[in-house]
Amino acid sequence: MHRFVNEQERPIGTYLYGRRMYEVMKVWESDELIAGEPDVMREYAEIWRGAEKVVYSRTLEDVETPRTRIEREFDPATLRQMKAGAERELSIGGPNIAAEALRARLVDEIRLILTPAVVGAGTRALPDGLRVDLELLGERRFRNGFAQLRYRVQ
């Protein structure tokens, strides 16, 4: 599963995160986290560390990771320019910031990884009140019960 994720993440040059997603992901900067972990985990850490990060937050005072900056407001025009000038892929992590990008029609693909567990809480992966037609590009099932769905936004 993690090898598959690494291959999906390798082309990404910039991660766009909401504050909560950034706080979850910044642990990949820690050498202590990956010490003694399998090669596939260390490889992911290298992929993550090599990318730029933009954190959309009105409350975060400072970032704790290199190659990271804070944007106080989500501005579709700025993201449109970033996307047009990007040499590598952009990835949006976090349901709130992803919803804003979907509403602004800035998302080309949606990739969902479904986990075989019901938690009963949290923010929806896809926003309410928005109609977006999707074309299934692929699916992948894993022995552990996880599944990945990949859609093109029409």
Image (cartoon, rainbow, N blue to C red):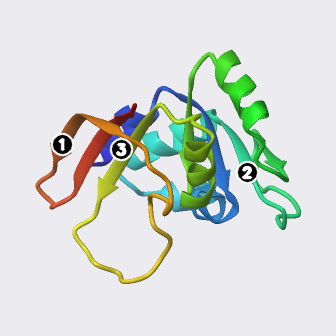
Which quadrant would residue 87 be assigned to in this image? top right
Identity of the residue drawn at 33% across and 39% down: 134
Give whichever of discs 1 and 3 has the lower sequence position: 3
Q: Residue furthest left?
A: 143
Identity of the residue drawn at 45% across and 67% down: 124
Give whichever of discs 3 and 2 has the lower sequence position: 3
- Spatial CA distance of label 2 from label 1 is 29 Å
Q: Is residue 71 left or right of residue 114?
A: right
Asked if 141 appears above or below 109 in the picture, the reply is below
SS class, disc 2: strand
Identity of the residue drawn at 64% across and 44% down: 16
The local crowd at label 1, few if under 14, some if 14 to 19, many if 20 or more residues have their Cα within 10 Å, is few
Measured as percent of width and height from the top left, residue 139 is found at: 20, 41
Is there any visible trace of residue 39 in the rendered image?
A: no
Label 2: which residue? 55
Measured as percent of width and height from the top left, residue 33 is found at: 53, 61
Label 1: which residue? 140
**Could you say which disc has been placed on residue 110 in the image?**
none
Q: Are marks 1 and 3 in contact (CB under 8 Å)?
A: no
Asked if 82 appears above or below 94 in the picture, the reply is above
Label 3: which residue? 40
Identity of the residue drawn at 42% across and 57% down: 36
- Spatial CA distance of label 1 from label 3 is 19 Å
Q: Are marks 3 and 2 in contact (CB under 8 Å)?
A: no
